[in-house]
Image: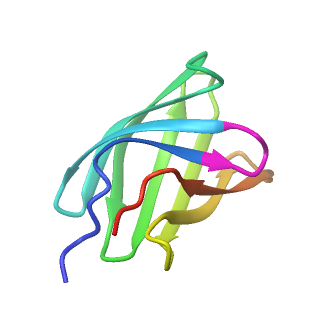
Amino acid sequence: MADLQVSGRWVAHQSNGFDVDFDLKQTGGTLHGSASHRGGSVDGDIPSGEVSRSGFHVVVLWRNGSRGDYSGTIGNDGRLHGLTFDVDNHQSQANWFSDKHFR
């Protein structure tokens, strides 16, 4: 089975009320791209990430100095569902799901 295709623009709706806009480019199982949240007031780069048949993982290097770790799996509904946390403060975390259906 081929890797999950997650390239393009989509939104991760977080349980803490924030939405993160991803813009990803995918080559096989490797990802890179950008992200923004708070209506675009905080941007970040995704220098590398990975995707498999059912999983997703990226770290966003936010321009405010924090690093957001996003991992997820594909659900029965075809959306990605996962957990995000601040790499330097694991207490700061939220569940998330994608607005886009990937299957």
Horizontal arrangement in the rendering, residue 71 relative to residue 65 (left or right): left
Find the residue positioned furthest to the bottom.
1
Horizontal arrangement in the rendering, residue 15 relative to residue 80 (left or right): right
Find the residue positioned furthest to the right.
91
> Does 14 appear above or below 61?
below
- Is residue 21 something that shows in the picture? yes
> Does 59 appear above or below 43?
below
Look at the image and name its color scheme.
rainbow
Horizontal arrangement in the rendering, residue 12 relative to residue 50 (left or right): right
- Is residue 86 something that shows in the picture? no
The residue lying at 49 percent from left, 28 percent from top is: 44
Task: Give x and y (percent) for residue 88.
Answer: 71, 45
Q: State the image quarter where residue 40 is shown.
A: top right
> Does 5 appear above or below 77?
above
In the rendered image, the quadrant that contains the C terminus is bottom left
Which of 103/95 is in front?
Answer: 103
In magenta, the rendered stretch is 13-18
Asked if the stretch drawn in magenta spans residue 17, the answer is yes
Q: State the image quarter where residue 10 is shown.
A: top left
Task: Give x and y (percent) for residue 76.
Answer: 49, 80
In the rendered image, the quadrant that contains the N terminus is bottom left
Find the residue positioned furthest to the top.
41
- What kind of secondary structure does the magenta stretch mostly adopt? loop
Asked if the stretch drawn in magenta spans residue 94, the answer is no
Task: Give x and y (percent) for residue 96.
Answer: 64, 56
Which of 45/15 is in front?
Answer: 15
Task: Give x and y (percent) for residue 55.
Answer: 41, 71
The residue lying at 16 percent from left, 61 percent from top is: 28
Horizontal arrangement in the rendering, residue 89 relative to residue 9 (left or right): right
Q: How many numbered markers are drawn?
A: 0
